[in-house]
Amino acid sequence: MTAAAAPRRSNAVLAAFSGPCLPLAAFGVALPVTLPEFYATYVGLELGVVAAVFMAVRLIDIVFDPFLGWGMDRTRTRFGRYRPWMALSTPMLMLAAFMMFVVVQPGAPPAYLFGWLLFLYLGFSIGTLGQLGWAAVLAPQYDQRSRVYGWWQVFNIIGVVLILVLPTIVVKTGIGDYADGVRIMGWGIIIALPVTIGLAMVAVPEPVTRGDAPHGSLGAYLALLKKPVVRKLLISDLLLGVAPGITGSLLFFFFGQIRGYDHTEAGLFMLVYFIAGLCGAPFWAWFATRVGKDRGLAVASLVSAVLYVGATLVPGGNFALTAVVMFIAGLPYAAGLFLTRAMMADAGDQERFETGIDRTGLMLSILSATTKIGHVVALVPYLILQWVGFRAVPGPDANSPMALLTLQILFILVPGVLLVLAGWALKAYPLTAARHNEIRQALDARDAEAQA
């Protein structure tokens, strides 16, 4: 079967495949945004302790990813290569959500946060890497792969929106306070995990990709990092991970202490931002098919930088105006996440073409590792703010002018610069659409010959 003749997956199949993104994305936004702030305010841990724990766990979790990717590449079962891993992640994430969101109480020690956060990250890595690898084999064509990862990203954003709106609904309807909203967030994740992953297992096929068993040597791992395609993509993804990570970790502090909005209003700004990403995702998927994924991602990064800085400079006191500019700033948000994943899957095809070895899982795990490094670096502002004497309490009067100026520089200027650099890193990206189509034709011919 040639790339041109490969089946075009129906919207129903892609929707079922993307369903697990709903609970996984809830974790994705809770880990860098909700949980650090929740454990610093409700549980009562010091801001520096929370930052140190999250950074330490992130660094440990990064080590897991290459081993998980290597294990997925070597997995051969009648249920597929990636689906068994997703099944494994389900009970792990359900238990982690219960312990991290639902039963934790004020006064819990740092060891509690460290242990369960590490367990959560392990399950999260297994689930997300399994789904990304599954996406890579679901549609091998250059443009169709953009479509698959576009669906993946749309459902990610839907999951983010749904989980962000829960605490706000709880507070506004009088059901409970913010802590109750976080607990309900946890219950939502626990219920959604088995439902969505089970549906995907039943409704979505997992095609078999041919290729020799991967070598697990350090040299093979480092050789991937030396390839221009992989290196450029990892640098761009690292920068794209740091920028929104800083935004998410400081959003409540910035809008609360600089712009004068309360916690619920700041959460609504974040919600509007992600809804805009949902609205903009189809355009960026379409745009990438017209100009190429690398150029599409570079343009999206530069546009995002301009719109983000412009939105954050709008003065406080006008909720409607701020909501509008945050919506506009969020329109390019989705492009970075789904295009980098689709581009790394393309790079996996190139690697299999050149070496005969399928390292898709390992390569996606490397990409996942750079994203996590970005999230670790995004917590550095917590340490900087503590160093300048910033206090995580409501109202601007609790902090010095220097502390508030530092917060503004970290929230406005730093992400804008990083987004520009992410686009610049993709200059002269070598794996174009034409080159990938040549590789796919050669791979399909090779696979057909081996099967015959």
Image: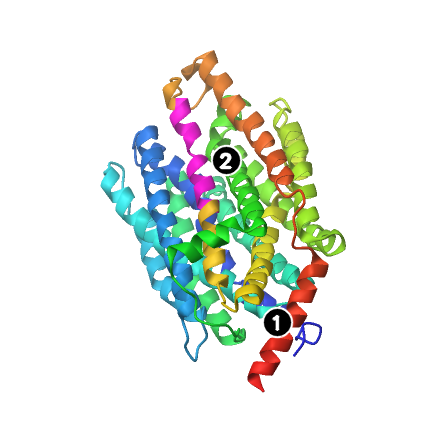
Vertical relation: 243 (above or below) 290: above
- Residue 293 highlighted magenta (yes or no): no
Q: How is the image coloured?
A: rainbow
* Residue 88 picture location, percent across and down: 36, 66
Label 1 SS = helix
* Residue 284 picture location, percent across and down: 69, 50
- On-image quarter of the N terminus: bottom right
Residue with the mark numbered 1 = 443
Find the residue positioned furthest to the bottom: 452
Checking the image for residue 264, the label placed there is 2
Q: Amino acid at mark 1?
A: Leu
**Secondary structure predominantly adopted by residues drawn in magenta:** helix
Mark 2 to mark 1: distance in Å? Answer: 52 Å
Q: Is residue 439 left or right of residue 199?
A: right
Q: Please report the residue visible at 36 percent of the width from the left and 34 percent of the height from the top.
A: 51
Residue 422 or residue 195, whichever sits in front: 422
Local packing at callout 1 (Cα closer than 10 Å; few below 14, some 14-19, many 20+) is many
Vertical relation: 433 (above or below) 279: below
Residue 175 in view (yes/no): no
Total number of numbered labels?
A: 2
Residue 16 or residue 293, whichever sits in front: 293
Question: Which image quadrant for residue 85?
Answer: bottom left
* Residue 305 picture location, percent across and down: 64, 34
Q: Amino acid at mark 2?
A: Thr
Q: Is residue 320 left or right of residue 255?
A: right
* Residue 294 picture location, percent across and down: 66, 49
Label 2 SS = helix
Which contiguous range is marked in magenta? 371-385
Q: Is residue 326 left or right of residue 360?
A: right
Q: Is residue 184 left or right of residue 357?
A: left
Which of pointers 2 and 1 lies earlier in the amino acid sequence?
2
